[in-house]
Image: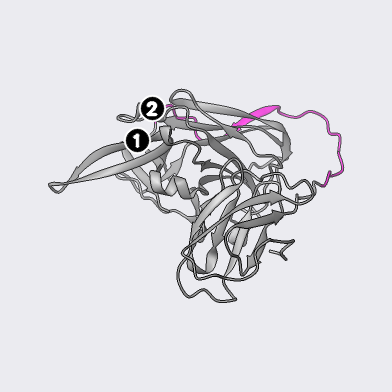
């Protein structure tokens, strides 16, 4: 089995930070406007320098800073269920405030029942390769792998599923939590854009194989299609694993974190990944013995 390792707008509502300081580290906490409660697992990025990190479950974060920052270098903060914000001239310790995103309820249209429930995506029970995350990348957080879906009929997304590959040497990584992500395909060039989940959903697969997650409520999928993604979330060091890799006679210590997302060979490319500071990119990972590509084993279960 081959492994692929992940590498590493608005107007500010408010911040207790005032000006850039001559420091190499920015520390702070992300909180919600009004309640001042912590925003868990927010992504904090310095996009101009292509660096970023992910806040903890209690909203705290630490972001290494490069030298010679200018007024045009702003901190971009985003989190599921909140309006993305950017902050200029921040110093440690910071309190970055996000505004909860308003949820608009669309008009409900009653239709006669059609073909019922269907599963979109691959149904394989064995992976050809796997996506994973290095320990360092997981601590920074915010890394995602996504698959695109474009059902021909209208309907709602009821469940999503991920094929979790077995760790051959790192069995202790089973049970590591990861975040479920669902996006509309309304981003630049049809890439992941609007968050379709309004609440944070963490899950953990206890064993290899297909791991199904029921959404809190059905999501009406948009006409342009949607993406289902897996996000690696750093929660505890116990889900890290060190192993020795020998290549060309040289030994190296490799640290991996969290669960492995299985992949399969397919004729068409259907894999996107997100890195803080770099945004979404299409990954063209060619298959080893065919003219196809390696794509993530992710399903969407919809009700038509």
Q: Which residue is mark 2?
A: 172
On the image, the x and y values in percent for residue 200 come to: 65, 39
The reply to whether callout 2 and callout 1 are in contact (CB within 8 Å) is yes
Quarter of the image where one finds residue 112: top right
Left or right of residue 241: residue 110: right
| Neighbours of disc 2 within 10 Å: few (<14), some (14-19), many (20+) | some
Disc 2, SS = helix
- The residue drawn where x is 66% and y is 56% is 96
Stretch in magenta:
104-126
Magenta span: helix, strand or loop, mainly? Answer: loop
Q: Where, quadrant-wise, is the N terminus in this rendering?
A: top left
Q: Which residue is mark 1?
A: 241
Examine the rendering and report whether any part of residue 4 can be seen.
yes
CA distance for labels 2 and 1: 8 Å
State which tag comes first along the sequence, 2 or 1: 2
Q: Is residue 52 magenta?
A: no
| Neighbours of disc 1 within 10 Å: few (<14), some (14-19), many (20+) | some
- The residue drawn where x is 49% and y is 30% is 123
Left or right of residue 32: residue 21: left
């Amino acid at each position: 089995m081959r492994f692929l390792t992940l590498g590493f707008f608005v107007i500010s509502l408010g911040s207790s930070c005032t000006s850039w300081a001559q420091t190499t580290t920015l520390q702070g906490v992300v909180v919600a406007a009004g309640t001042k409660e912590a925003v868990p697992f927010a992504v904090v990025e310095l996009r101009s320098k292509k660096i970023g990190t992910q806040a903890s479950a209690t909203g705290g974060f630490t972001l290494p800073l490069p030298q010679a920052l200018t007024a045009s270098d702003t901190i971009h903060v985003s989190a599921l269920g909140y309006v993305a914000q950017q902050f200029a001239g921040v110093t440690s310790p910071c309190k970055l405030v996000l505004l909860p995103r308003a949820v608009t309820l669309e008009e409900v249209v009653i239709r006669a029942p059609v073909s019922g429930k269907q599963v979109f995506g691959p149904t394989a029970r064995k992976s050809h390769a796997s996506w994973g995350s290095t320990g360092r990348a997981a601590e920074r957080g915010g890394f995602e792998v996504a698959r695109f879906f474009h059902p021909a009929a209208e309907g709602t997304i009821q469940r999503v599923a991920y094929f979790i590959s077995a760790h051959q040497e790192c069995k202790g990584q089973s049970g590591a939590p990861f975040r479920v992500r669902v996006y509309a395909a309304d981003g630049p060039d049809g890439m992941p854009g609007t968050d379709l989940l309004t609440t944070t959903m963490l899950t953990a697969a206890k064993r290899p194989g297909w791991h199904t997650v029921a959404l809190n409520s059905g999501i009406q999928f948009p006409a342009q299609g949607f993406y289902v993604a897996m996000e690696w979330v750093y929660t505890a060091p116990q889900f890290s694993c060190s192993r020795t890799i020998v290549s060309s006679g040289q030994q190296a210590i490799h640290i991996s974190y969290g669960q492995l997302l299985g992949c399969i060979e397919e004729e068409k490319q259907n894999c996107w990944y997100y890195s803080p500071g770099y945004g979404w990119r299409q990954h063209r990972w060619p298959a080893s013995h065919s003219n196809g590509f390696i794509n993530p084993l992710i399903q969407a279960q919809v009700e038509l």
